Image (cartoon, coloured by chain):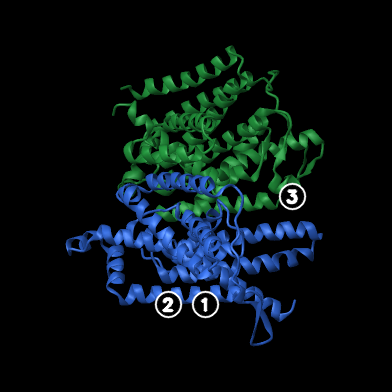
Chain colours: A blue, B green
Amino acid sequence: MSLQLFIEQLLNGIQFGFMLFLMSAGLTLIFGVMGLINLAHGSFFMIGAFSASFVAGLTGNFLLAILASLIFPALIGILVEFSIIRKLYERDHLDQVLATFALILIFSEATRYIFGAFPLFLDIPNILQGNILLPGEIVYSKYRLIIIIIGLFIAIGLYFLINRTLLGIQIKAGQNDRQMIRVLGINISRLYTIVFAMGAALAGLAGALIGAIQSVEVGMGEPVLILAFVVIVIGGIGSIKGALIGALLIGVLDTMARLFLPIFFELIMETSQALSLGSSLASMSAYLLMALVLIFRPTGLFGKK
Amino acid sequence: MLTEKKFNLIIVLGIFAFSLIGYVINEPYFITLATKIVILGIAGCALNLILGFGGMVSFGHAMFFGVGSYVAAISAFHSMNGETINLIFFDFNGSSQMLFNWFLAVIFSMFFALVVGSISIRTSGVYFIMITLAFAQMTYYFSVGWTKYGGEDGLSTYVRNDLFSINTMLPLNFFIICFACLCVVGFILNWVINSNFGNFLKGCKENEEKMISLGLNPYTLKLTAFVISGAITGLAGALYVDLNRFVSPTSLSWQTSGELIVLVILGGSARLFGPLLGAIVFILLEQFLGEVTENWQFWLGVILVLIVLYFPKGVSGLFIKD
């Protein structure tokens, strides 16, 4: 294998990692601040992808499509938070699991009803098609590079939001002591709505960005959701930094395992078997990492006990 | 309002009656539905032992269900095609005997539960939810990659296994076998929950420190419950293979774990047989809505949300007085 291929795959892993980060950032904040297990977070990923491909089909403008992938999920997030989620904060995790599981059914079926059962497509805009030559003779997809850059900007933006703004201080305070910030006269239900909408928007953005690489279909959010849960558990629940590091770890590990394990097994068995064993072991790698992390650090890498 | 004993009796007899009606009016599909309810009910009640009474939210019970399914299916598969499995000490030819395959399924899922439980129970809360999920996902991907037994396409066993000289292919006969299993499992779980062990387990859920100060070891208590629960779920998995004569990685997927949790919460986790009622409501709703509308999943979701919001004790909370 050439070094170029290795670096290309490494970049793919980082790109996948940033995608997972966009999903996990919202998930970890929603869990950290409101104590809510939100299984329906994957639905916002799907809604983002569908609204982007709908707006792109209508206007032909990719930027507008991306904008839609932030706004629609946020609006739906606010609506759902207001009508259902709000009543679940005081309940135990079990009720939250059942209610948000039910929300997955509702969102998926509604999307299928509106857009039909066939996958949609979202085209990469012309200027982002094709490859770019990076230093060191590495040829890499322009679009994937843009995803990495967007992810990087959002990570930096979230860092400033959490550490340098009033909203961020309120969010951190909400994680530490809910009662106290209520006593201090901060409108906590407004804060909850904002955090939920923000998480939904980030998930929607992730869906739209990925939607241009894969197809846009019902149920596309759930596999990503489960991996995002793995990420936030590895990083420590509630920690944005943990989510970023966990996401990049999982992204790179998963991509590299997919590349190397089949090659490794080909040495000791026939090709078709090696491919299927290698790819199934690669899918297991993220969960294996999570189990290992939890065995040695039961609250994740950056979680508080 | 009913006492819990009457409630248990009524739903168990109700399922039996439903299946008999299906037999009388010659509607075998009713019997199949009742069998499905019984099998998923067994798995739900097993999950509820650790979830409702032990406070351990396992998001990976599909693992035990699926392991039970796969073990039973692989044994039946080998007995059918005559291929032997070379184990170190002896050759295994597979078996077409239900009792033997159940036994294998229970032993294997107990073993999985012991390994997974001994690691997972060191964590708690949401970390416990996620680590059980992680182990289940690993078995899921393993089954997808295990092409010898069908991989992603699953494994067909074509005929049901044998039990004594009963014709298990007749729906009513197979229903009665599953029903008998349900009764046995019900008695075992009832005994476990009302024993000293069961009281200690409930104590661990309420206050672990108190249990430690009483000289008990919460870890061992929880692990024991986890293994019992895994074993019974494995039995349900083996029965499910016989019902469908087919097993696929879906039975190991996180959706299956999620559905089992849904059965428990829907029926009410505070009661031993709550999940059985949950299975009745879930499967009949699925069936009924599926006939009325194409978008039945949407309405199922709406009904589930309403139940969570307005009946926090689950459906069984409507019938049982405290």
Q: In front of the other: label 3 or label 1?
A: 1
Residue B40 shows in the view: yes
What's the residue at 61%, 31% (across, down)? B239
Q: Chain of mark 1?
A: A
Q: Nearer the viewer, residue B117 or B19?
A: B19
Res. A275 image quadrant: bottom right
Q: Is residue B7 left or right of residue B38?
A: left
**Label 2, label 3: how far apart the Cα atoms are:** 44 Å
Q: Which residue is mark 1?
A: A149
Q: Is residue A37 left or right of residue A274?
A: left
Q: Which residue is mark 3?
A: B147
**Which amino acid type is shown beneath numbered disc 1?**
Ile
Q: In the rendered image, which quarter contains the N terminus of chain B?
A: top left
Q: Chain of mark 2?
A: A
Q: In the rendered image, which quarter contains the C terminus of chain B?
A: top left
**Which amino acid type is shown beneath numbered disc 3?**
Thr
Res. B26 image quadrant: top right
Q: Chain of mark 3?
A: B
Q: In front of the other: label 2 or label 3?
A: 2
Q: How far across and how far down the image is residue A146, in percent?
A: 55, 75
Q: How far across and how far down the image is residue B282, in percent?
A: 48, 33
Instruction: Please tell me whether residue A178 is drawn above or below residue B205 in the rendered image.
Output: below
The mark found on residue A156 in the picture is: 2
**Which amino acid type is shown beneath numbered disc 2?**
Ile
CB of mark 2 within 8 Å of CB of mark 3?
no
Q: Nearer the viewer, residue B195 or B163?
A: B163
Q: Residues within 10 Å of mark 1 (few under 14, many from 20)?
A: some
